[in-house]
Image (cartoon, helix red, strand yellow):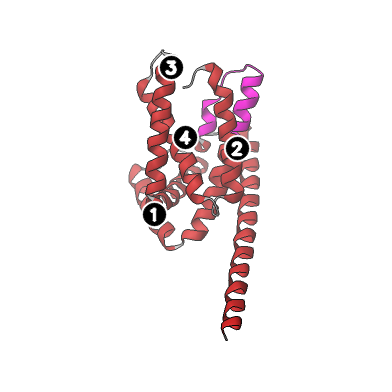
Amino acid sequence: MLPVAYQTPAALVLLVGGILACFAGYRLFRLVLGIYGFILGALMASTAVGSTETWWMIVSAMAGGLIGALILIAAYFIGVAIVGAALAALAVNLIWTQIGGDPHPLVVILCAVAGALGALVLQRDVIIVGTAFGGAWTAIVGGLAMRANAAKTPDDVWLAYPASLDTHRGWLIAAWIAIGMLGVVVQFRWTAKGARKTRKKKTDNNSKEG
């Protein structure tokens, strides 16, 4: 948990990073990995420290964020596998939420492993879907956190955990799916356009050589 004075800038980072991931996640995947690695590292470090000293918490969050960013950027393929595993685990939790109760840990683990393996086989598709929906949720969290800070209302911690949404917050799921699907469409069109340009360049080069 960051000091109050730094919560609005942190929310802005989530909002901008989420939008970037949602609509340009595949093209800028290493940058997106760095952003999410920084966020995860900062959250883990600040939670572990749990200090009342503002500067010590900030230094810990920055250090943890930099370490997390470097790890995910350096481990590109691990990052791809993590995206697949996270998507699979999220899907299982959302399905079980509708059924009632919590999924067995073994089921979550098996689905996460399957998702990770599938991600390595279908890298492009998984990266696009994962970054679109992950970015959409991050942007929603950042946007609502900024609104809550502006209105000086308590933070909604549940926003970070989509599987724990109550029924009266179902509109957030609808917004998340709509923004995520828009991100998927934009990214697929963008990558398809880039692929056509690449093929055209190769064709032109072959024609010149011939």
In this figure, which residue is indicated by the disc labeled 2?
16
Give the residue type at disc 4.
Ile
Q: Is residue 11 above or below residue 35?
A: above
Q: Amino acid at mark 1?
A: Phe
Pick the residue in front: 1 or 116. Answer: 1
Q: What residue occupies the far front of the structure in this picture? A: 209
Point out residue 15 in the picture as x, y percentages from the top left corner: 60, 35
Name the residue: 62% across, 26% down.
Answer: 146
Q: Which residues are magenta?
A: 140-160
Q: Position of residue 63 (x, y in %)?
A: 39, 29
Q: CA distance from mark 1 to mark 3?
A: 35 Å
CA gap between label 2 and label 3 equals 25 Å
Q: Earlier in the sequence, mark 2 or mark 1?
A: 2
Quarter of the rendering occupied by the C terminus: bottom right
Q: Position of residue 52 (x, y in %)?
A: 41, 13
Give me the disc on residue 77.
1
Position of residue 45 in the picture relative to residue 39 (left or right): left
Residue denoted by label 3 = 55
Whole-number angstrom distance, CA of label 3 to CA of label 4: 18 Å
Mark 2 residue type: Val
